[in-house]
C-alpha cells in the first residue's frame, strides 16, 4: 500500500468515525443534540491534531522517539495551577469564575513558564537541548510535588474536583474557550509553517542540519516556542493528554515508514483523530461514561510504551 | 580561500585549540595530522561552524563565517564528521538527496536529480542506491556519506577522519576519490587523518598539530621527515622512499 493510499484511507476512517459520533442515536432533538456533539467533536479533533503535530515536531527536534512535550513540565504546571486555584479560592470558584479566565490564566502561565525556561537556558551558548529537557523534568517533578502537597491539605471534597482535572476530558468543553483556543492554535500553526521544511533535515541531527545550511539555534528555538503554545492550549482546553502524542507519533512512524514530515505530520494527526474519536465513542457507547478517555489512552499508551522500550533495547 | 586567524577554544579549563592561524590553499588536499587530543577535529568543527570558538575568526572567501547566511555557506563548505548516527531509516539515494537541501529546500528539481545521480555514480553506488543504510558495510556507508557531500557540490569539503574503521582497500578507494575531486573538479579538500602514510601519499599540504597548536605546516615534502614527525608524535619514525613516495615506518 502506497503512503498516499494509507493517508487517504486514514482520512476516510477519521471522517467515518466523526460522522458516527455525530449521528449515532440521534433521536428527534436534532437542534439540541447536534450542536452539542459538534462542539465536542470539534474540541476532540482540535486537541488530537495539536497533540500529534506538536509531538512529531518535538521528537524530531530532540531526535528522540520516546519523548513527549510534557517532559518540559507543562502538564505538571497545569495541575499545579488548578490545584492552587482550588486551594486558595475553593472549588466553588471554578463554577463561579468564568471559564475563560481559568483558561487564559493557565495558558498564560504555561507559556510564560516555557518562555522563561527557554530564555534562561538559551542565553548561555553551548547549552544543548538535552539540558533543557533535564531542567524541564526537574521543574515538572517540583510542580508535581507542590501539587501533591496542596492536594493533601485540602478538603477531600475539593480534592475530588482536583482529581477530575487530572485527567483529560471532553465531556464539558466551553464554547467560548474553544474559540479562543482555535484562534491561538491557528495562529501558532501558521507561524510554524515556514519552518516545517527544515524538519526532515533536523531529523538527521544537529551537525548534519548545520552542514546543510539550517540555522539550527534560530529554528529550534522558534519550534520549541510553537510547541509550548500548542501544548499549553490543548492542556488548558481538555487536561493533560500529551501521552497520546507518543502513541500516535510512533504508530505513524511504523505505519508510514518514511522520514518525510509532510506525510508523518498528516498521518499522525489523522491517527490521533481516529484514536480520540474512536476512543470517545467507546467511552460513551460501550462504557457509558463509566470511565474517561484519558484512562483508556494512558492504558493503551502505557502498554505501547513498554513495547517500544523493549523493542528499542534490541537494535532496529 | 579559507583563512583561520588566531582561533582558540577551551573545553572547561583545558585549551584544546590555542591561537591557531592557517591558510588553506584552494584546489589542493590539506591534511591535518597529529596525536590524539591535538585538536584536529575541534579545529575542523570550528572552521565548519559546528562548534563556536572563543576567540579569533574564520574567513571563507574573505568573509567571516558568522556573517554568511547559513544557507549560502552550505553551498560553499561542507563537513562530514567521523561518526554519523542517523536515527532515520534512509536509502542511499535518500541520503544523497539530502545533500541538495541547500539548493532546493527539500523540493528536488531536475538539476538536483542530475547532481544526485552523478554523485551516486561518482562513488560507484549505483547498484545499491535503493538499499537502506543499515544494510551496508562500513565502507559502503562511508561512501554513501561522501556521495552526499559530493551532491552538496561545495567548493570546500572538510572530512573528519573519513578512513576511521575502514580497511586498506576502502581507505585507498576513498583517498583516490578525494584526489579525483580535487584534480578533476577543482575542489578544496581538508581532511583529518591518523595514518600518516595516507597523508604522505595523497595530500598536497600537511598541517601538523600538537596540544592545540600548529607545530609545522607546509607541503607534504617538508613535513614528512624524521625530525618533524618526532616533534609531533614524540617517537622515532623512519622515512623510506618507495616508488617516489615517502613511507613512514613507525613499528619499532
Image (cartoon, helix red, strand yellow):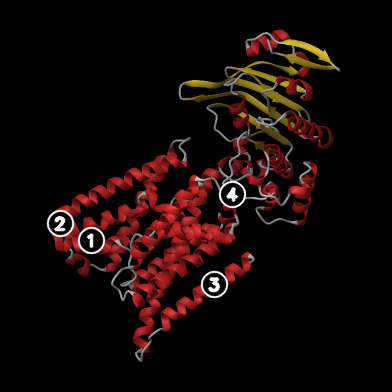
Q: Are marks 4 and 1 on the same chain?
A: no
Place of residue A197 in the rendered image (x, y in percent of width and height, measured from the top left): 59, 55
Q: Outermost residue toward the right?
A: B243
Instruction: Point out the tag, 1 or 2, that comes first from the N-terminus.
Output: 2
Q: Which of the two discs, 4 and 1, sits closer to the camera?
A: 4
Looking at the rendered structure, the secondary structure element under dot 3 is helix
Place of residue A145 in the rendered image (x, y in percent of width and height, measured from the top left): 25, 47
Instruction: Point out the tag, 3 or 2, that comes first from the N-terminus.
Output: 3
Is mark 4 in CB contact (under 8 Å) with mark 1?
Answer: no
Is mark 4 in CB contact (under 8 Å) with mark 2?
Answer: no
Q: Are marks 1 and 3 on the same chain?
A: yes
B38 relative to A135, above or below: above
The residue under label 3 is A11
The residue under label 1 is A162
Tell me how far mark 1 sits from mark 3, CA to CA: 36 Å
The residue under label 4 is B88
Q: Are marks 4 and 2 on the same chain?
A: no
Is mark 1 in CB contact (under 8 Å) with mark 2?
Answer: yes
Tell me how far mark 4 sits from mark 2, CA to CA: 49 Å
Residue B49 vs residue B172, the one in the foreground: B172
Q: Which of the two discs, 4 and 2, sits closer to the camera?
A: 4
Amino acid at each position: 500500500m502506497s503512503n498516499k493510499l494509507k493517508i487517504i484511507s486514514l482520512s476516510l476512517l477519521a471522517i467515518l468515525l466523526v460522522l458516527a459520533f455525530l449521528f449515532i442515536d440521534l433521536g428527534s432533538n436534532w437542534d439540541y443534540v447536534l450542536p452539542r456533539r459538534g462542539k465536542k467533536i470539534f474540541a476532540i479533533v482540535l486537541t488530537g491534531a495539536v497533540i500529534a503535530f506538536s509531538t512529531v515536531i518535538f521528537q524530531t527536534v530532540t531526535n528522540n522517539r520516546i519523548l513527549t512535550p510534557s517532559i518540559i513540565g507543562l502538564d505538571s504546571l497545569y495541575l499545579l495551577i488548578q490545584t492552587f486555584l482550588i486551594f486558595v479560592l475553593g472549588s466553588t470558584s471554578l463554577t463561579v469564575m468564568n471559564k475563560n479566565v481559568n483558561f487564559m490564566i493557565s495558558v498564560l502561565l504555561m507559556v510564560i513558564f516555557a518562555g522563561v525556561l527557554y530564555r534562561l537556558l538559551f542565553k548561555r551558548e553551548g547549552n544543548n537541548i538535552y539540558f533543557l529537557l533535564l531542567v524541564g523534568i526537574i521543574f515538572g517533578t517540583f510542580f508535581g510535588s507542590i501539587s501533591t502537597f496542596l492536594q493533601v491539605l485540602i478538603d477531600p471534597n475539593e480534592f475530588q474536583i482536583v482529581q477530575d482535572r487530572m485527567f483529560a476530558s471532553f465531556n464539558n468543553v466551553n464554547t467560548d474557550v474553544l474559540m479562543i483556543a482555535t484562534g491561538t492554535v491557528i495562529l501558532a500553526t501558521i507561524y510554524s509553517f515556514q519552518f516545517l521544511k527544515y524538519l526532515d533535515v533536523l531529523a538527521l541531527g544537529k551537525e548534519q542540519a548545520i552542514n546543510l545550511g539550517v540555522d539550527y539555534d534560530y529554528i529550534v528555538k522558534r519550534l520549541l516556542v510553537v510547541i509550548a503554545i500548542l501544548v499549553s492550549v490543548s492542556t488548558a482546553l481538555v487536561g493533560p493528554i500529551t501521552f497520546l502524542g507518543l502513541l500516535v507519533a510512533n504508530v505513524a512512524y511504523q505505519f508510514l515508514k518514511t522520514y518525510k514530515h509532510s506525510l508523518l505530520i498528516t498521518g499522525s494527526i489523522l491517527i490521533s483523530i481516529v484514536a480520540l474519536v474512536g476512543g470517545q465513542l467507546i467511552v460513551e457507547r460501550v462504557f457509558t461514561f463509566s470511565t474517561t478517555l484519558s484512562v483508556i489512552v494512558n492504558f493503551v499508551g502505557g502498554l505501547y510504551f513498554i513495547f517500544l522500550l523493549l523493542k528499542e533495547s534490541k537494535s532496529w | 580561500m579559507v583563512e583561520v586567524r588566531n582561533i582558540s577554544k577551551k573545553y572547561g579549563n583545558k585549551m584544546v585549540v590555542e591561537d591557531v592561524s592557517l591558510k588553506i590553499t584552494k584546489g589542493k588536499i590539506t591534511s591535518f595530522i597529529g596525536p590524539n587530543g591535538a585538536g584536529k577535529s575541534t579545529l575542523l568543527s570550528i572552521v565548519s561552524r559546528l562548534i563556536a570558538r572563543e576567540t579569533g575568526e574564520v574567513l571563507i572567501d574573505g568573509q567571516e563565517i558568522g556573517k554568511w547566511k547559513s544557507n549560502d555557506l552550505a553551498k560553499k563548505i561542507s563537513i562530514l564528521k567521523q561518526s554519523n548516527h542517523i536515527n532515520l531509516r534512509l536509502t542511499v539515494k535518500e541520503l544523497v538527496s539530502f545533500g541538495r537541501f541547500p539548493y532546493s529546500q527539500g523540493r528536488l528539481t531536475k538539476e538536483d536529480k542530475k547532481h544526485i545521480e552523478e554523485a551516486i555514480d561518482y562513488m560507484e553506488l549505483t547498484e545499491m542506491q535503493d538499499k537502506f543504510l543499515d544494510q551496508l558495510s562500513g565502507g559502503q556507508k562511508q561512501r554513501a556519506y561522501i556521495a552526499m557531500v559530493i551532491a552538496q557540490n561545495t567548493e570546500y569539503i572538510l572530512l573528519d577522519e573519513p578512513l576511521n574503521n575502514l580497511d586498506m582497500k576502502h581507505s585507498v578507494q576513498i583517498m583516490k576519490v578525494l584526489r579525483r575531486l580535487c584534480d578533476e573538479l577543482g575542489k578544496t579538500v581538508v581532511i583529518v587523518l591518523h595514518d600518516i602514510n595516507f597523508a604522505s601519499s595523497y595530500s598536497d599540504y600537511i598541517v601538523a598539530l600538537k596540544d592545540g597548536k600548529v607545530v609545522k605546516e607546509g607541503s607534504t615534502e617538508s613535513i614528512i621527515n624524521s625530525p618533524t614527525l618526532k616533534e609531533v608524535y614524540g617517537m622515532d619514525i623512519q622515512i623510506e622512499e618507495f616508488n617516489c613516495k615517502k613511507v613512514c615506518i613507525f613499528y619499532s
